[in-house]
Amino acid sequence: MIVKINNKKYTATKGQTILDVAREHGIKIPSLCHHPDLDVRASCRVCVVEITGRQKLATACSTELEDGMEIYTDSSRVQKSRNLNIELIFASHIEKCATCTLRFNCDLLKLAQEYGVKIARFPDRKAKRKTYKFANAVEIDGSQCIDCNNCVEACHNQGIDFLKISGHGHEQEIQPVKAKGSACIYCGQCANACPVAAAQEQGEWQQVEAALKNKKKIVVAQFAPAVRVSLGEEFGLPYGYNCAKKINTAFKELGFNYIFDVNFGADITTMTEAEELMERINNKKAVFPMTTSCCPAWVAYAEFYHPELLPNLTTARSPHIHSAGAIKSYFAKQKGINPKNIEVVSIVPCTSKKYEAARPELTYKGKPLVDHVLTTREFAFVLKKNKIDLAKLPESEVEPMFNDGSGAAAIYGASGGVMESALRTAASLACAQKKTKNKLCVSRLEFKEVRGLKGFKEATVDLAGKKVRVGVVNGIAHFEALLPKLSKYHYIEVMACPGGCLGGGGQPLPTTNAIRQKRLEGMYAIDKGKTKMRRAHENQPMVEYYQWVKNNKLASKLLHTKFKATNK
């Protein structure tokens, strides 16, 4: 069909909306509540347009095109209505810009500036609304909510349904469900869906800045696998671009004393998990399937909703906890530093890592292994606040005692990556146990069956002649359907966030399916580039540390953890 937008003809297909075609051709139509992965609600009404022959303005996000339709995106009627809508939205959104991590890329603020809107024309009608905090991970600030309801849908899409809409009309409010048997798992997908940071991570950047000013502390930074392929988006770099070495430099610019890569910790996790998998496979009385435990949102889900499955979880700690353990034990000993003087700051794609870092099980010598956790968004905010442009920084390296990990570590942030990393090492361990030169053990490196963004993936793999049934849950919403057939499997990976960590609740906005795919491709490109070290056990500095832990009988303190049921 042929349509006209601002007197210019365009071709469109049935089912496309005005907004679809406008964006396809670079035509500016502002929007706030629209998210390509969520249902269209047209609640913000910022995207209104004028259609010839229609008395009322239409929302571009929800109006499907018809042949011969003539649309105007910036007529006087549109301008008046759009600006009024933006003013009314500001009446629902108390400005807390100074401490808001969305400050430097806030679409609402940009709209006000672009269209000359008076943001204080109407009184703030939500000043007395509550802020709901979920553990130390996520919060929903009712005084900033613009009633788009994206967070409710995102939580529903996760299968959690912990958020609800209460009240009607101007009394409408997003609240947590208080029913027994409901709990937040801290995944942060609500924050990924919120266009105005009413739902967001609980910030720790101020504590980090204070630590950096404390000359009595050795402040070290470490960043997770998924951060390197997403942080660049905040600075205009392409989706999936590997900016790891620029991140190293950014830490130095901020004044961190030492810089580490969590990929090193991912190799420790892989080694620990692969060993446990083989131990279970060789033990007829072992609990199966063994499941991954490096996703703290999945752990929170299991501890609350399915405590009967806690024996299934691998006892291996997650990568940033492992690398923090290596820093506060081995590294501190080698450098002659009192570990009590070290503060570890983790930069992660995940809001639930904040909750994980505070778990009492994850301490060393009575102190937390990770002292502060910043999401990718928070770290981008800190850089911008300090006028550090990541894109323009030169590259540099991490602390030489620990390296930037293997190719297997690089894919940890993608759904199926933890599984594949463990299988690479498990295959070699199986060969060593069998003392054979089986073709699989010698040559098989990649397990492509477990890759991709499909909701559930499964395969049967051969480990030195043993058939091992594996499955990968991509997004916690897909887990319940697996329960009836769980006993069929030996090994299951569960990632609460769609796409895995690369789609985590602390990632840059927007995070969409298309963007997840680009980040995923970036991770596998890093893996491919590690031609001499694509398996965790090929990381010699990690192996030396791992052996040191075992020789000093520190495995229970530095490699393994425990889980416990939480009250319903």
Image: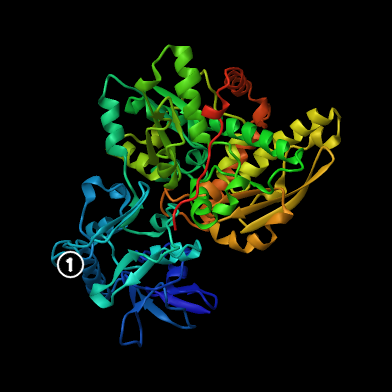
Q: Position of residue 417 (x, y in %)?
A: 62, 43
Near-viewer residue (75 or 324): 324
- Give left or right: position of 118 versus 278: left
Q: Which of the 4 image quarters holds residue 220?
A: top left
**Label 1 amino acid?**
Arg
**Residue at image mark 1:** 125
Between residue 533 and residue 84, name the one nearer to us: 533
Residue 25 seen in render: no
Tell me the crowding category of disc 1: few under 14, some 14 to 19, or many 20 or more residues within 10 angstroms, Cα based.
some
User: Residue 261, relative to residue 55: is it above or below?
Assistant: above
Q: Please tell me which residue is depicted at 33% across the width and 34% down the height of the picture.
A: 388
What is the number of callouts on the image?
1
Out of 14 and 496, give the one closest to the viewer: 496
Q: Is residue 464 visible?
A: yes
Tell me the quarter of the image containing the C terminus: bottom left
| Residue 171: percent from left, percent from top | 24, 73
**Residue 375 position within the rendered picture, expressed as x and y whole percent measured from the top left:** 40, 43
Q: Secondary structure at mark 1?
A: loop
Left or right: residue 47 compared with residue 429: left
Q: Is residue 151 left or right of residue 448?
A: left
